[in-house]
Image: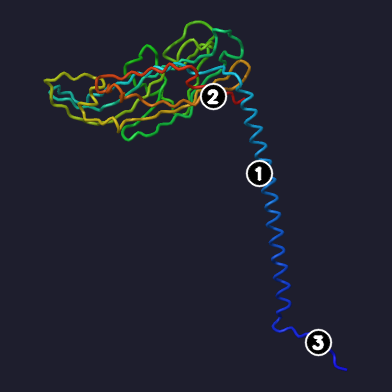
């Protein structure tokens, strides 16, 4: 009696089994990956939702806000020539900024809306095509004139001394705990033009925004948005941050008024224009 045998040609049967095993393994790995992704996304979504919910709980009421900002833009120059038959100028544009913090102290003043610590950091400049920008603390008594005090420039951050009473030294960064004095800053864009020669000495040269027109500075080249953070810690050790973004005022497209006329003033008076958000 002959035996029946199964002939496997070129290992085809073994190969099919191995292929099926590989496919099944891949499907299992994909399934595990999808399950892990779903679980991770669910956990992340819940954590995100919890953090958002916690953030809004902390900020249910506005304690600090910026409601008033006053900006004064003009220009100035350094005269490099000793011979007054010509003017050899390095031209600068500057904007003085006064920021008033509303802490609702007309309702009441307590540990929650009084300042224990304050500092400014994270200074940035954007959209500027020409010049060298900086932001500095400024003495309120020099508001409206270019000072360019190098040691007052905010390179990393500037901390304010907080006073409960007494007289403020306005030449130093100091702030009353009840927010009754403004923050004064100077934005400066230096050396927009260097060694610019003006030989028309028959026409009076006024050191203000008119310099930009006389020296051929295009306003589009010196438009700038300055941004920075104001950080407040109150007497409950709660921390608040305001993200401030300001477009340097150079012209008014509605009235046609520009800094070329000598100066450009902008007033912002809007309740809760910039809110301080509590993060701790």
Q: Quadrant of residue 97?
A: top left
Q: Which mark is residue 241?
A: 2
Residue 161 versus residue 42: which sits nearer the camera? 42
Instruction: Please say which color scheme the image uses.
Output: rainbow
Residue 84 versus residue 191: which sits nearer the camera? 191
Question: Which of the image's four quarters has the N terminus?
Answer: bottom right
Residue 222, position as x, y percentages in the image: 31, 31
Residue 220 versus residue 210: which sits nearer the camera? 220
Say which residue appears at 14% left-offset and 25% top-offset: 86
> Which of the two discs, 3 and 1, labels the residue nearer the N terminus?
3
Residue 30, position as x, y percentages in the image: 68, 57
Camera-side mark, 1 or 2: 1
- Rounded to the nearest angstrom, the CA distance separating label 1 from label 2 is 30 Å
Residue ID for mark 3? 5
Say which residue appears at 65% left-offset and 39% top-offset: 45
Query: Is 181 situated left or right of 194 in this image?
Result: right
Residue ID for mark 1? 41
SS for callout 3: loop
> Which of the two discs, 3 and 2, labels the residue nearer the N terminus?
3
């Amino acid at each position: 009696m002959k035996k029946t045998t199964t002939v496997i040609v070129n290992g085809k049967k073994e190969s099919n089994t191995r292929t099926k095993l590989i496919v099944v393994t891949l499907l299992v790995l994909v399934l595990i990956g999808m399950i892990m992704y779903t679980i991770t996304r669910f956990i992340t979504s819940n954590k995100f939702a919890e953090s958002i919910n916690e953030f809004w709980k902390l900020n249910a009421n506005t304690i600090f806000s910026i409601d008033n900002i006053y900006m004064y833009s003009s220009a100035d120059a350094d005269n490099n020539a000793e011979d007054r038959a010509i003017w050899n100028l390095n031209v600068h544009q500057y904007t003085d900024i006064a920021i008033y913090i509303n802490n609702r102290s007309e309702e009441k003043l307590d540990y929650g809306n009084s300042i224990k610590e304050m500092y400014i950091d994270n200074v940035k400049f954007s959209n500027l095509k020409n010049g060298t920008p900086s932001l500095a603390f400024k003495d309120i008594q020099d508001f409206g004139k270019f000072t360019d005090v190098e040691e007052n420039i905010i390179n990393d951050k500037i901390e304010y001394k907080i006073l409960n009473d007494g007289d403020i030294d306005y030449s130093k960064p100091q702030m009353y705990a009840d927010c009754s004095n403004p923050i004064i800053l100077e934005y400066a864009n230096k050396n927009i033009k260097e060694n610019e020669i003006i030989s028309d000495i028959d026409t009076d040269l006024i050191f203000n925004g008119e310099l930009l027109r006389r020296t051929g500075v295009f306003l589009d080249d010196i438009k700038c948005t300055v941004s920075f953070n104001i950080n407040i810690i109150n007497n409950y050790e709660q921390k608040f941050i305001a993200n401030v973004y300001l477009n340097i005022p150079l012209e008014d497209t509605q009235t046609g008024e520009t800094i070329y006329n000598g100066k450009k003033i902008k007033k912002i008076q809007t309740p809760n224009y910039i809110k301080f958000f509590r993060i701790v």
